[in-house]
Amino acid sequence: MKNTDINIINTDHIERYGKIYAEAFSGEPWNDPWKTEDAIVHVSELMESKQSYGLEYIQDGKVVGFIIGTSMLFHYGRTFEINDLAVDPGYHRQGIAKKLIEQMLADLKEQGIRAVHLITAGEGYLPEFYEKYGFKKENKVILMGAEL
């Protein structure tokens, strides 16, 4: 039997989060060429935000996944953006992402968050995964970007 726990993210584990992030996002469906040292900086910057909140998934004493995001106040209440959800590729298909997002959504509801948003791949398995938890494609807004 596996010993598991979900805890609030911890700066003591930042290097592990960076390694998980780099490995997870360097694979399908993203295939982004992340270096671990850059991923550590990425996650550190999110954690340093005053409005950040995140959870880690521990299995048999080892961090194997995490979810993190930030909240922002709007005229209708506080919203939350899930910035990253990453699971060590060696632990995929064990329900870890499911447990992390379910716990995150429950926590955010308890904290009085009015809405939760995220950006994900438009194709593949990710939209279907998030739809299971009530996320749907926004019709009123679009993501726009400019390369500098």
Image (cartoon, rainbow, N blue to C red):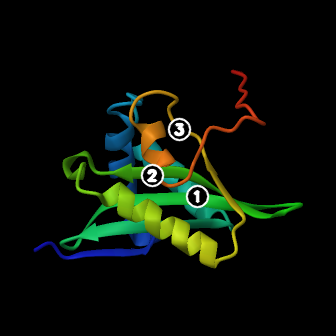
The amino acid type of the residue labelled 3 equals Thr
On the rendered image, what quadrant is the N terminus found in? bottom left
Q: Position of residue 90 (x, y in %)?
A: 19, 48
Residue 65 to residue 53: above or below: above
Q: Which residue does the numbered mark 1 point to in the structure image?
A: 69
Q: Earlier in the sequence, mark 1 or mark 2?
A: 1
Q: Are marks 2 and 3 in contact (CB under 8 Å)?
A: no
Q: CA distance from mark 1 to mark 2?
A: 9 Å
Q: Nearer the viewer, residue 18 or 102?
A: 102
Task: Identify which residue is drawn at 41% across, 63% down.
Answer: 100
Residue 59 at x, y = what percent?
23, 69
Q: Amino acid at mark 1?
A: Gly
Residue 16 can be seen, yes or no: no
Write down the residue under mark 2.
85
Q: Which element is circle 3 on? A: loop
In the image: residue 119, left or right of residue 30: right
Disc 2 is placed on an element classified as strand
Q: Residues within 10 Å of mark 1 (few under 14, many from 20)?
A: many
Q: Quadrant of the C terminus?
A: top right
Q: CA distance from mark 2 to mark 3?
A: 10 Å
For mark 3, what is the residue? 120
Give the mark nearer the N terminus: 2 vs 3. Answer: 2
119 and 134: which is toward the camera = 134
- Could you tell me which residue is drawn at 62 percent across and 72 percent down? 109
Give the residue furthest to the left.
1
Left or right of residue 98: residue 94: left
